[in-house]
Amino acid sequence: MHSRPSSRSSSTVSNHSTVHDERAPKASRTKSTTPPSAPAPTANATPRQRTARVFDHTPAAALARQIYLKVVGGGIFMVVLLIFTVLSIFWGSTWKIPAHKLPGWVVDFDNGDIGRTVTHALTSSASNSKIAWTVLPASAFPGGAAQVAGMVLEEKTWVAVVVNSGASARLAASLASPNASYDGADAVTVYAVEARNENGFRNIIRPSIQAALDALASSFARSTAQRIANGSNVAELLSASPQTVTAPLRYRIDNLAPFDVPVATAVTFVGLIYQLILSFFVVMLSDAARTASSFSSTLTTRSLVLLRLGTSFVGYFVVSLFYSLLSVAFQLDVSKKFGHSGFLVFWMLNYCSMLAGGLALEAMLTLLTSKFIAFFMLVWLITNLSVCVFPIEVMPHIFRYGYGAPFYNVSQAMRAVVFGTKNVVGLSFGILIVWIAISCITMPVFQWFVHQREAAASTSAQSTEAAAPQQTESEKRASHESDGEADHGETVLGSSGRVSSTV
């Protein structure tokens, strides 16, 4: 009799435990809606293991290879594109030189046989010459040969061939009465300026002059020998003054400003490349400093522009000073044209040169970012360097832009300071200042444009986020009601189990 209640009681307890077991998972599911917080990293956390290989057969490795090849392949394509679009500019500047002839003068102060011979020889060979000769009357130079030399030094022309006064008379006198001191080189003087462009002088002017006048000297010596062959004093002439017969006509090249300071190459050509590289370093260092200090993302447009300009002007002031001192340390004489003020002029030229090149990089960095600024630097370098190798006059007309290029003007001004050529320092400073002003205008404009673009992108992102579908209150209530119904169903199911078990 007592065994049945005991069985029923145990069954009831068992069913109650079943109900609790069925409700427990639901409670657990309800509480688990809050995501668990990630475990905080500990000081003894194990470093990330490097286990991947380039050719792993995993989706992650395949994606990494695809990204890597895309970046490297795109970069190499850009480099190849630069080779044919930018480097070809430099190659073109040295191809088929001279594409045009350099201007030259022929001035006859002799008005004799030698003068007419030299003038005719140079003008008749103009088609094969690299110099376009223009014959000017001696009356245009009342100061004589010295005035011609001064005008060549002042870059009125590239070269001048002067037949000296009395050249024919001296030859005739020596033929009639042998003169042991006769020198045929007194007949013709060639004036040129090597320091104006050493490549133009060495590769165009001097070879052209030597080829033309050497041929003329040989021809004139033969004609002179034939003319005096039957003379009564030939033996005496050959004995006392043989040079009168063998070299009656020679010439002397008067290099008015020789390029005789090898270290000057560092400031007139190669050093211009180094200047741009140093400017690039300053640009990238200041960009890194703005990023590290968060100035690039926190400052207003006006403050950021002023910071960038101030950094450039102060930075290049210091760098250009030590760059100038380096040249002086290697005994580059900068006092030939301006005396003791020469170093100040030299320093300010380097300063303005760095500003003109560096600020252009600074402005373009705003648009191109640090990823692509190196490509612009190469373009800037090649377009400037191409017009500094040979005289612009002998290059194709497309290179006439060089007259306004920073490198060309710095190079010309440096030649005036170091070698005493034509004083173009004022003009060069003016052109450099124009380039500096252009960058000072474009850089704020570019910065404003970038900030406007970033602001528009931020506003668009916020609008998209605000327009995303959100859960309404009714949806939340419906969700709660469905959860309650599920709980009720589980309770009924548990009660049924208890009843059936009781029965």
Image: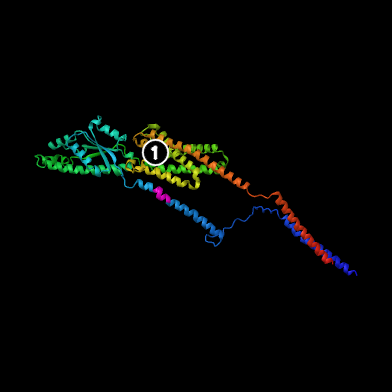
* Residue 360 image position (x, y, % from top left): 46, 41
* Residue 386 image position (x, y, % from top left): 38, 44
Q: Which residue is farthest right? A: 1
Residue 66 covered by magenta stretch = no
Display coloring: rainbow
Identify the residue position indicated by label 1 in the image. Answer: 404
Please, what is the three-letter code of the amino acid marked with disc 1? Gly
**Residue nearer the viewer, 478 or 461:** 478
**Secondary structure type for disc 1:** helix
**Residue nearer the viewer, 366 or 500:** 500
Residue numbers of the magenta segment: 81-87
**Residue nearer the viewer, 421 or 338:** 421
Left or right side of 61 for 80: left
Residue 82 covered by magenta stretch = yes
Q: Residues within 10 Å of mark 1 (few under 14, many from 20)?
A: some
Tally of numbered tags: 1
Q: Residue at x 20, y 37 (%)?
A: 187
Q: Quadrant of residue 184?
A: top left
Q: Quadrant of residue 50?
A: bottom right
Dominant SS in magenta? helix
Left or right side of 294 for 154: left
Tell me the quadrant of the picture where the C terminus can be found: bottom right
Can the viewer see residue 121?
A: yes
